[in-house]
Image (cartoon, rainbow, N blue to C red):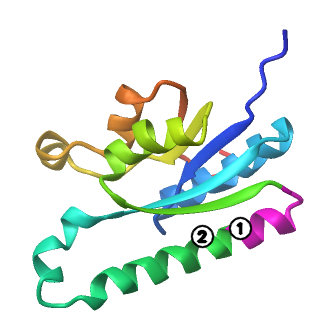
Amino acid sequence: MVLKYEQIIVAVDGSKESSWAFKKAMGIAARNDATLNLVNIIDTRSYAAVEAYDRSISERAHKFAEELLMEYKQEAEAAGLKKVNIVVEYGSPKTMISRDLSKKLSVDLIICGATGLNKVERFLIGSVSENIVRSAACDVLVVRTPEGI
């Protein structure tokens, strides 16, 4: 029996760690002839209070996410990947990626970058990657290093 990934989520947010995760995800998707789902979750909790005063924040966040994912999609397609999807959602990245989207897309691998939270931040809020590892029903790859290291 050959194990093969068919549906991969890579969570990207514009950070260097998520860029590393994307690069490694492209290689894994190519080797498995898998669908690569480029995902950005707009964390509504981070701007909920400000949104009451400035409704354009949500629109700007969505535009940034779509542009970011489109750049990644173009890079993936230029590298020869044929099955690349873009997913922009609103909510908590911690739960949306590992629970909601992974089920909705029948994902068998989630790839994300490690975050640079310090010990206090991890204690208070926990990292997204840490939560994904704990709650995902599929394989998870947390990328800590650039491609080639």
Give the extent of the magenta segment. 73-82
Q: Is residue 23 magenta?
A: no
Outermost right residue: 80
Regarding mark 1 in the picture, which secondary structure is present there?
A: helix
* Residue tagged 1: 73
Quarter of the C terminus within the rendering: top right
Q: Any mark on residue 69, and which?
A: 2
Residue located at (59% from left, 42% from top): 105
Q: Secondary structure at mark 2?
A: helix
Let me know if residue 77 is in the magenta part: yes
Q: Position of residue 8 (x, y in %)?
A: 65, 42
Q: Name the main secondary structure of what is drawn in magenta.
A: helix
Q: Is residue 4 visible?
A: yes
Query: Which residue lies at the image location 52% right of the left edge and 57% below the top edge?
Result: 18
Q: Position of residue 123 (x, y in %)?
A: 13, 40
**Is residue 85 found left or right of 87 in the rendered image?**
right
Residue 37, compared with residue 49, is above or below; it is above
